[in-house]
């Protein structure tokens, strides 16, 4: 079919399609002979052979050159058409090479000629398109020029081919089929293969390239290939395929954060997948290069990742064990750490543990909001909050405020427990553990600043079970330690107090021992040397004095011994069936004998048995007598008046619980009464207020009473003086 | 009678322990001193005759008023009377400060540690006053 167009020119503008090889050849020959200025030829790699092989064509080239026509020839120079291209080079002005040239055409200054080859590329064309329409010719000239400019000189290509010089080339491929082809080629040509894949990479690799890779693996077995290494994220979604690939012999490692683009490289070439999300959808392009610089760049990226990657086998094990979520992250930014801190505390469900390295740290973090948030969590979700912080007054006040705040909302039962550590708790970081599942350790960089961001340096987040539980162990140990410290401190204080009291006792005891010795010494000395000067009365008085004071020493010695026995729990009671009344009466008699002309004057001792003269107890005779005597002489000591009365009464009673019948003995005096200051310590050792006595008497009384299963107490009388009571369990038998 | 009395050196003893005062009085009177004794320091102060006594022997640890306090009060009335303090020694640390104030230079010279033997106490008394025996 012909198209024609009316023209100013003589020549009729037309485009024709001509069939038959003869037609093709003839037109080509005509074309050559008619051209006056230039011929630009663009042919695929099959044509140079034909151009040289077809004698007529070859001659046309030579003839055109001779005529001075500018001849340019563009083709794909390859190994298999190298010799032909070289011949063409001698025939035309310039030959250039362009990879993958397709389509054949020739353009002169006025005509366009395009032989169309049949499917069988080796045979000559059997159809030809001819056009001399100005627009078409210009257009095709433009096309030729575009190719020509991109092409490289034939000499260079020939040199590359002959000397094996690799032509460095970077190109982008957009066609998805082509992309797959190129990757296959890259894989097949490789002697070593590395790839780094993002999400979905493993599936992709399996679906498209597994077979090709298996061939590499075979070569590897023969020692002809260095192997395939792959880096990717291994997780639930691709664990099965990963297993298959690993089983086949591909080495795979897992990293948490691979780079955002996938790439695959061999020893020769690198292919990088670029994905774009355009308006039209997801498009993929492939950057392909054999530039050594690119290859080494990506190789170094790969090696760095490979170094830190986790072996697929281990990773798969972790996934199966459910430990795949273990994560440790070092956070450089203190503000990010602060955010994470608040988030962790806010989301706590069961337990929040804090260890603060200093009291200012707590105050800082209180300002940050962390501590209040913890308390909120405690309130809302009944989480237990425990805090370990070094003590200072400001912190204590702050905590009091917080607890008061909690107290104001009684509907929420918040559990906040604070223990104070010694100032150097040892940790120079704040340690937070939430729900025993995550930990955040924030290093203290500068304790003197007032804001969290300035104070904190590096932070480490972990949800790795072993790590978090280690911190929990540290916390629990410190927690118990603070309790121990407190106990030790208290024990120390008690010990110091005890030591002080001991010392006081020794002082008083020494005084009490020395006091009766003096009159003995003086009197005996006197009698010894000045016997002649002493009257009979004085002699009697002196002997009496010696006797009295010796007895006093005896009592003191016994008291001290008793106290020692009580203290070391070696007080032995020889219990027997006794009449309490009888003991009381005989004790009264003894005391009266001792008193006689003592300074207490006319103090009386009255006895009241409440009508029951025989109340029986099972008790140690000596000790009960000692008990009663002690109480009586005590009562007498408090009497400083000349009409003092001590009355002692016994009666049977039910004890408070109603469980037992007891004998209640009450000793009442009308003396000065008991000083309210010593009331709480009345029955303690060394409750010394009076300047007489050892201060042991009442202690010994109490020990005796309690050893018998009774109770002892004292009260000031409403009117004057005091009353001491004690109970002893009675014997029911007749 | 009164002359004889006036020749004697007069000692005032105050100790809340009656046996001590009785025994000491007995001994010292045989030695030729005139001895007055009190067991109540407040009462003793009230009865004190300024200029009458040459020597005071005072117990330290007494209720209501201790020996030092008593001495301070007596000193206000009688500047020349000498003094010994009877001490069981165990209470001395309590009175260290008082001791420093009252006797900054001499200190130990005025303290008699009880119990004390008769010869010893005589010797001490003779260092400050002579006895007429």
Image (spheres, coloured by chain):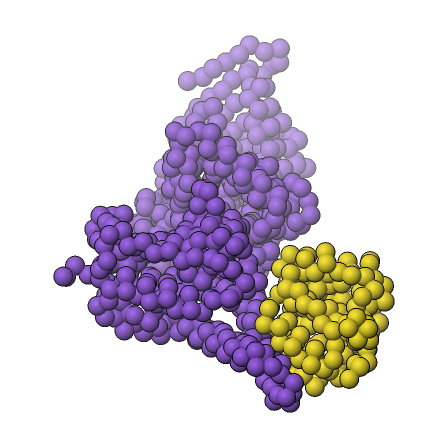
Chain ID, yellow in image: B
* Residue A324 rendering spot, x and y as whole percentages: 36, 50
* Residue A183 rendering spot, x and y as whole percentages: 42, 47
* Outermost front residue: B1
Which quarter of the rendering shows the N terminus of chain A? top left
Front residue (pair A494, A445): A494
| Chain A image colour | purple
* Residue A689 rendering spot, x and y as whole percentages: 55, 58
Residue drawn at x 66%, y 49% is A447
User: Image height check: is A681 above or below B51?
Assistant: above
Front residue (pair A23, B1): B1
Residue drawn at x 54%, y 41% is A399
Residue drawn at x 27%, y 51% is A610
Residue drawn at x 54%, y 63% is A599
User: Image height check: is A372 above or below A565?
Assistant: above
Residue A698 lies in what quarter of the image?
bottom left
């Amino acid at each position: 079919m012909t198209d024609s167009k009316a023209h100013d020119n003589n020549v009729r503008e037309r485009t024709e399609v001509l069939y038959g090889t003869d037609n093709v050849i003839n037109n080509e020959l005509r074309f050559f002979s008619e051209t006056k200025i230039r011929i630009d030829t663009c042919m695929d790699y099959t044509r140079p052979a034909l151009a040289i092989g077809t004698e007529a064509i070859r001659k046309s080239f030579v003839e055109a050159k001779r005529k001075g026509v500018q001849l340019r020839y563009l083709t794909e120079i390859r190994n298999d058409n190298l010799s032909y291209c070289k011949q063409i080079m001698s025939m035309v002005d310039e030959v250039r090479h362009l990879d993958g040239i397709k389509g054949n055409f020739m353009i002169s200054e006025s005509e366009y000629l395009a032989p169309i080859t049949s499917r069988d590329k080796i045979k000559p064309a059997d159809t030809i398109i001819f056009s001399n329409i100005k627009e078409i010719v210009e257009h095709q000239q433009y096309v030729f020029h575009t190719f020509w400019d991109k092409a490289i000189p034939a000499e260079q290509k020939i040199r590359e081919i002959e000397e094996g010089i690799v032509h460095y080339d970077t190109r982008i491929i957009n066609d998805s089929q082509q992309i797959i082809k190129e990757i296959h080629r890259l894989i097949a040509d490789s002697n070593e293969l590395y790839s780094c894949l993002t999400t979905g990479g493993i599936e992709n690799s399996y679906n498209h390239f597994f077979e090709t890779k298996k061939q590499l693996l075979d070569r590897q077995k023969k020692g002809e290939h260095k192997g395939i290494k792959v880096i990717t994220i291994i997780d639930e979604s691709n664990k099965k395929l990963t297993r298959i690939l690993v089983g086949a012999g591909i080495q795979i490692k897992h990293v948490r954060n691979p780079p955002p683009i996938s790439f695959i490289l061999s020893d020769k070439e690198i292919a990088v997948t670029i994905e774009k999300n355009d308006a039209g959808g997801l498009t993929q392009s492939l950057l392909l290069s054999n530039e050594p610089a690119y290859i080494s760049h990506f190789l170094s990226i790969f090696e760095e990742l490979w170094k830190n990657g986790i072996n697929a086998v281990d990773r798969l094990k972790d996934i199966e064990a459910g430990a795949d979520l273990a994560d440790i992250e070092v956070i450089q930014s203190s503000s990010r750490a602060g955010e994470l801190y608040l988030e962790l505390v806010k989301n706590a469900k069961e337990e929040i543990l804090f260890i603060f390295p200093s009291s200012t740290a707590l105050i800082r973090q209180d300002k940050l909001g962390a501590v209040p948030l913890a308390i909120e969590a405690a309130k809302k979700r009944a989480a237990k909050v425990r805090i370990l912080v070094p003590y200072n007054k400001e912190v204590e006040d702050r905590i009091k405020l917080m607890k008061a705040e909690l107290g104001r909302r009684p509907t929420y039962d918040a559990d906040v427990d604070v223990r104070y550590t010694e100032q150097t708790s040892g940790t120079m970081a704040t340690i937070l553990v939430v729900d025993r599942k995550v930990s955040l350790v924030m290093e203290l960089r500068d304790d003197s600043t007032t804001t969290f961001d300035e104070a904190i340096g590096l932070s480490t987040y972990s949800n790795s079970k072993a790590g978090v539980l280690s911190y929990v162990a540290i916390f629990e140990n410190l927690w118990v330690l603070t309790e121990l410290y407190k106990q030790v401190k208290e024990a120390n204080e008690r010990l110091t107090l005890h030591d002080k009291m001991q010392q006081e006792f020794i002082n008083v005891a020494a005084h009490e021992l020395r006091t009766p010795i003096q009159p003995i010494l003086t009197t005996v000395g006197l009698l010894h040397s000045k016997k002649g000067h002493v009257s009979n009365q004085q002699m009697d008085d002196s002997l009496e004095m010696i006797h009295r004071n010796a007895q006093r020493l005896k009592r003191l010695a016994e008291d001290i011994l008793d106290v020692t026995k009580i203290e070391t729990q070696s007080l032995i009671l020889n219990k027997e069936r006794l009449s309490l009344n009888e003991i009381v009466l005989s004790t009264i008699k003894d005391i009266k004998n001792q008193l006689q002309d003592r300074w207490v004057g006319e103090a009386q001792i009255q006895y009241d048995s409440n009508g029951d003269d025989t109340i029986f107890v099972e008790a140690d005779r000596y000790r009960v007598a000692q008990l009663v005597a002690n109480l009586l002489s005590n009562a007498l000591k408090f009497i400083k008046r000349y009409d003092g009365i001590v009355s002692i009464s016994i009666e049977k009673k039910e004890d408070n619980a109603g469980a037992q019948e007891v004998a209640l003995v009450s000793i009442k005096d009308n003396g000065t009464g008991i000083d309210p200051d010593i009331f709480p310590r009345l029955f303690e050792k060394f409750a010394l207020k009076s300047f007489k006595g050892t201060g042991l008497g009442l202690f010994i009384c109490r020990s005796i009473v309690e050893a018998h299963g009774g109770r002892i107490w004292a009260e000031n009388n409403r009117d004057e003086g005091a009353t001491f009571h004690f109970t002893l369990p009675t014997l029911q038998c007749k | 009678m009164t002359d004889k009395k006036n020749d004697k050196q007069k000692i005032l003893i105050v100790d809340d322990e009656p046996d001590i005062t009785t025994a000491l009085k007995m001994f010292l009177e045989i030695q030729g001193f005139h001895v007055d004794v009190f067991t109540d320091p407040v009462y003793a102060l009230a009865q004190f005759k300024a200029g009458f006594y040459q020597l005071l022997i005072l117990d330290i640890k007494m209720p209501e008023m201790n020996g030092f306090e008593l001495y301070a009060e007596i000193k206000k009335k009688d500047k020349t009377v000498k003094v010994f303090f009877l001490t069981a020694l165990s209470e001395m640390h309590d009175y260290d400060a008082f001791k420093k104030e009252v006797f900054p230079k001499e200190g130990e010279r005025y303290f008699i540690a009880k119990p004390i033997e008769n010869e010893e106490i005589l010797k001490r008394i003779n260092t400050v006053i002579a006895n007429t025996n």
